[in-house]
Image: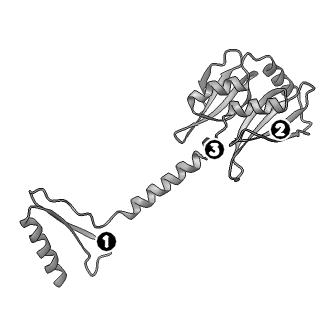
């Protein structure tokens, strides 16, 4: 009873000066907080007493989800630069490049290069400095006719992986690029991230023209 009298007194005082007051009271048998607002016609300021904690939690979750989606897009070294560094270290034909988030302080670029003698190497490039961290030979012997045809198509392509990566950078941060054999037609497949949204693109080997993947 005493609390109700105090609230009524405050409300009357603010109304007398043309202001606004927001008073919050909970009944003894109520679980939810009720808000009672008295508004005057003057130029007084409003007072917010209670914030919506549920909304704050939802916003925090949304921010976390967005940060998770865009972790790989924070690399300082672009796909094109990583490919150039890999080719300088291990000359050959790049068949793929992928930004790999392995949980360390900085992500790394994994660039697959096929040398002139047909041997394939995985070249690891630091995404923060562009330094080649190492290269290892791929000992997988599963080299079938499709793989050889795909490699031959890439060697004869008018646009290589680096050039396509440069063009795709206009669509967002390139996180992955690789050869894709779609019903016998080899093309470049590119993944980009922009504003937390991932997109997939196709690029023809002869024109380098980018089109959004219809399956995206």
Which type of secondary structure does the marked residue at label 1 adopt?
loop
| Image quadrant occupied by the N terminus | bottom left
Compared to residue 171, the image places residue 30 above or below, namely below
Q: CA distance from mark 1 to mark 3?
A: 43 Å
Answer with left or right where residue 67 lies relative to residue 174.
Answer: left
Q: Which is closer to the viewer, label 1 or label 3?
A: 3
Residue at (72%, 50%) from the top-left corner? 102
Residue 147 at what x, y percent from top left?
Answer: 84, 28
Disc 2 target residue: 122
Quarter location, residue 208: top right
Give the structural element (helix, strand or loop) at label 2.
strand
Corner quadrant of residue 70: top right
User: Where does the image place residue 11, in percent across and percent down from the top left?
Assistant: 13, 70
Note whether 11 is above or below 80 in the view shown. Answer: below
Tell me if residue 122 can be seen.
yes
> Do labels 3 and 2 touch, CB within 8 Å?
no
Q: Residue at x 68, y 48 (%)?
A: 106
Q: Residue at coordinates 79% horizontally, 28% vertically from top-left?
A: 94
Mark nearer the N terminus (3 vs 2): 3
How busy is the neighbourhood of tag 2: few (under 14 within 10 Å), some, or many (20 plus)? many
14 left or right, relative to 107: left
Q: CA distance from mark 3 to mark 2?
A: 19 Å
Q: Which mark is residue 32?
A: 1
Give percent across and percent down for residue 195.
51, 39
Does 62 sit left or right of 19 as displayed?
A: right
Residue under pointer 3 = 72
> Secondary structure under badge 3?
helix
Sequence-first disc among 1 and 2: 1
């Amino acid at each position: 009873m005493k609390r109700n009298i105090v609230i009524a007194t405050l409300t009357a005082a603010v109304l007398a000066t043309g202001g606004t007051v927001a008073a919050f009271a909970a009944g003894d048998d109520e679980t939810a907080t009720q808000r009672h607002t008295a508004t005057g016609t003057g130029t007084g300021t409003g007072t917010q007493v209670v914030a919506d904690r549920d909304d704050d939690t939802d916003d925090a979750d949304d921010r976390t989800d967005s940060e998770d989606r865009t972790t790989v897009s924070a690399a300082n070294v672009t796909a094109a630069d990583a490919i150039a560094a890999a080719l300088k270290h291990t000359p050959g034909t790049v068949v793929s490049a992928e930004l790999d988030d392995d949980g360390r302080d900085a992500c790394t670029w994994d660039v697959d290069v096929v040398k002139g003698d047909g041997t394939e190497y995985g070249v690891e490039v630091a995404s923060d400095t562009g330094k080649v961290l190492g290269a290892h030979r791929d000992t997988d012997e599963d080299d079938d006719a499709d793989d050889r045809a795909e490699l031959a198509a890439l060697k004869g392509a008018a646009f290589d992986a680096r050039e396509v990566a440069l063009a795709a950078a206009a669509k967002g941060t390139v996180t992955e690029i690789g050869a894709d054999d779609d019903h016998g037609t080899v093309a470049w497949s590119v993944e980009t991230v922009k504003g937390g949204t991932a997109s997939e693109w196709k690029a023809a080997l002869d024109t380098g023209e980018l089109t959004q993947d219809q399956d995206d």
